[in-house]
Image (cartoon, rainbow, N blue to C red):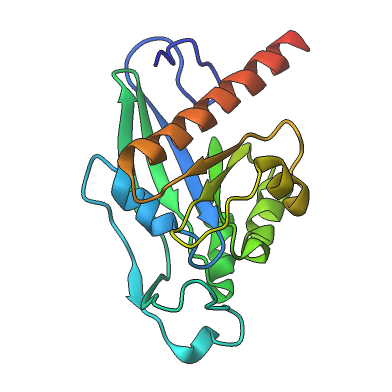
Amino acid sequence: MDFKGFDQPGGPGSGGTRSVKVMIAGGFGTGKTTMVRSVSDIKPLTTEETLTQASAADDHLIGVADKTETTVSLDFGKISLNESLMLYLFGTPGQERFWFLWNGLFKGALGAIVLVDTRRLASSFRAIEEMERQNVPFVVALNVFPDSKDYPVEEIRDALDIPANIPVVACDARDRASSRDVLVALIRHLKDRSAVALESR
């Protein structure tokens, strides 16, 4: 995949290897840490701690009852999509009591992936709202869990009120190739937005 023509302020352009900050966001238990671990070229930095009862009233464990750890600050990894483009990946904490960290984490981000668990759509509303509030370009990735129902993409789009210009793709966050495909979809989306912005000048 050739991204050398991708040109965005603060992002990759001509000459050398360019580094881009990408956020991986989503609700509690949607697979953010799993995606960073599966796709990173390096051993990722994670800040997982044992899940306690402190958030029992806020975090609904339907579909993730076996979850024993949660991210309390961020996950970090990196991946080279080719010789000219390096992505630095920052996974956000999903628990509501850590959402105050999001503002700092999103500074300097060129784009984001919002992971969605189709068994618990409501858990991703906040992440989508945050992308729109901070004006961060994003794609939506439907993380397919073993017991997930096979919903049509357009049905999910309507349920989450996702605009038509936002890509929605299915993925398996455990699989490196699948997670990489989501990152490629995000870069393509950023390229398309950049091209539209240039045309409108």
Query: Does the rendering let one see residue 107?
Result: no
Please give the count of numbered marks on the rendered protein: 0
The residue lying at 67 percent from left, 54 percent from top is: 130
The image quarter in which residue 62 lies:
bottom right
**Can you give x and y, in whole percent of width and height, for residue 144 in the image?**
48, 52
**Can you give x and y, in whole percent of width and height, for residue 33 in the image?**
38, 58
Is 171 on the left or on the right of 193, as rendered? left
Seen in the picture, residue 120 relative to 7 is either above or below; the reply is: below
The residue lying at 46 percent from left, 28 percent from top is: 184
**Can you give x and y, in whole percent of width and height, for residue 3 in the image?**
44, 16
Seen in the picture, residue 199 relative to 171 is either above or below; the reply is: above
In this view of the protein, which residue sits in the foreground, 86 or 167? 167
Is 28 on the left or on the right of 164, as rendered? left
Query: Which residue appears farthest toward the left when viewing the image?
Result: 43
In this view of the protein, which residue sits in the foreground, 132 or 61? 61
In this view of the protein, which residue sits in the foreground, 125 or 175? 175
Is 35 on the left or on the right of 135, as rendered? left
**Can you give x and y, in whole percent of width and height, for residue 13 in the image?**
46, 15
Please state, as top left, top right, bottom left or bottom right, where the C terminus lies in the image.
top right
The residue lying at 42 percent from left, 70 percent from top is: 72
The image quarter in which residue 21 lies:
top left
The image quarter in which residue 52 lies:
bottom left
Query: Which residue appears farthest toward the bottom when viewing the image?
Result: 53
In this view of the protein, which residue sits in the foreground, 142 or 33? 142
Query: Does the rendering let one see residue 186?
Result: yes
The residue lying at 39 percent from left, 16 percent from top is: 1
Is 189 on the left or on the right of 197, as rendered? left
